[in-house]
Image: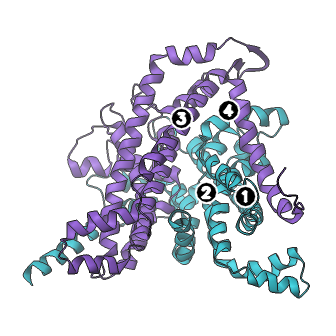
Amino acid sequence: MKKKTWRSILKYASITAITICFVFPIYWMLLTSIKPNEAILKLPPQFVPVTATMDNYRGILTDGKFLIFYRNNVIVSGVTTLVTLILAVLAAYSFSRYRFKGSRFVMMLFLSTQMFPAMTLLIALYNMYFRLGLLNTYTALVLACSTNALPMSVWILKGFFDTISKSLEEAAYIDGCSKGRTLIQVILPLVKPGILAVGLYSFLISWEDFLWGLTLVNKTGMRTLASGIAMTYLGEYNYDWGRVMAAAVGAAVPILIIFIFLQKYMIAGLTAGAVKE
Amino acid sequence: MGTKKKVNWFMVMLLVPAVAMLTVTIIIPVFVVIGMSFYHYNLLDMNNITWNNFANYRAVFKDAEFIRTFGRTLIYVCGTVVSQFFIGLGVALLLNSRSLKGRKLFRSLLFLPWTIPSLVVAVTWMFIFQPQYGIVNYLLNLGDYSVLGSPKTAMVGVVISAVWKQMPLMMIMLLSGLQTVPEDLKEAAEIDGATGLQKFLCITVPCIMPVVKTVTLTSIVSNFQMFVLFFTMTGGGPVRATTTLPLYTYETAFSGFNLGKGAAIGVCWLVFLMIFSTIYNKVLSAKEVEY
């Protein structure tokens, strides 16, 4: 009996310690963003807010750059999500329902493209976009980000389509429903969780993007959040940490909120890809 | 040739958009980059392209820095993947035990770092490791020693921030793997008098092997590509102590303006990853069990 209580104490102690270690940096980021500058540079550090200020947020909101980065990021991520969803739904449905010679090969090819180092592709893409005049455009960023998200999205959605019985379509065809209408009106409503999971996944991937935003864009007005923050607020020696942290919180908040409300779908999407087969 | 079948145009139409997209943004670029690696290709003079008789590849293999960079990349990848795997597995096992109350809350809290964008991860940890008023120096009493500014510890700093961001995904994947382990098998083993460790090694491990294979391979491949943390936190320094493959490729191609050599490095990297993942898949597949 005694051995059991010790074991369970140990369990709770270790899981609590690990959780604190993993949550603390987020707390620290939030806290720093509302500290006045004197408090940030103080030793010993203040672990609870003593004086809270919104100055850092006011600072980044009025500097005429942060909001531009934000707008660009919302546009790129939004369009990327839409494009990825449309392409992934169509391709995944096809992979799930039709077998043809080499369909497995095409599917594997799809998945293996994830392995190609982005940096290697970047050299070619930079060259191609330069010649096509696509540098500094949303199109370039959306294309690059959708490519990152597409292979996994197809794989996740295929899993969801696979769970739906084929008899549904057969019944719809007998009723005189066309193939396209069957997909849209009969099948799609049944894979709503999958669509949500894939939408969240591709939004996250494009919201995160740093590499493409850094290289395919070189005008401040076209920068997205991650590369914009790195190029604007991180100077050579002196950092205004309060503002950097406020910008960081601003970049992290949308995903945090999405996660808090929709974590079930997000996790379902992520694990579906790995656990199936 | 085989049986004659009507082409299923509906199926073709469904596939065309996605295939076209990946062709334009991945398949063609791969061929373009292979092509570029054989030419003299300068970023500042992109219209003057000449065949240079494998000079790019010769330059890469003669460059001692390339080998060192490769070594550092391996150290980073191994450090990050191994630590997050063991932390992730430990946490997943804890979260999978039925007697633990509040499992959902712990799981949600532990998953939070994964939702933080990589750049934000980088700046947050830079602040935590800040030499004068950073929290790590204060707690460990390091004075104004700069963790990220010293060749000996810079890599450790980056690995810690990478593990912080990536462990949650590893944990959630392993947890979902653990939940597929059939309960009755464990019970049967218990009746036969198996110890906890025996149950873990003989039942749990073989059952989660496919998941382990997928998550570790994905993690290795994606960490080979880690760019944002190095670029932001250390810029590859101090004295190149954290210059890994992506950064080296980037520097060569974009700061050094040598797109040709950058392409050659990229091609070597691609070839290495393809060979590696084929072998990795073969080796680990041998240990899988099917139910």
Which SS class for mark 1? helix
- Residue B101 is situated, as x and y percent measured from the top left of the image, at 30, 82
The colour chain A appears in is cyan
Question: Furthest residue to the left?
Answer: A2
User: Which of pointers 4 and 1 lies earlier in the amino acid sequence?
Assistant: 1
* The colour assigned to chain B within the rendered structure: purple
Q: CA distance from mark 3 to mark 2?
A: 19 Å
For disc 1, the marked residue is A80
- Mark 4–mark 2 contact, CB under 8 Å? no
The reply to whether the C-beta atoms of the residues labelled 2 and 1 are less than 8 Å apart is yes
* Residue A123 numbered tag: 4
Amino acid type for the residue under numbered disc 3: Pro
The three-letter amino acid code for the residue at tag 1 is Thr
Q: Are marks 4 and 3 on the same chain?
A: no
> Upstream in the sequence, badge 4 or badge 2?
4
Disc 4/disc 3 C-alpha distance (Å):
11 Å
Q: Are marks 4 and 2 on the same chain?
A: yes
Helix or strand or loop: what does disc 4 sit on?
helix
Q: Secondary structure at mark 2?
A: helix
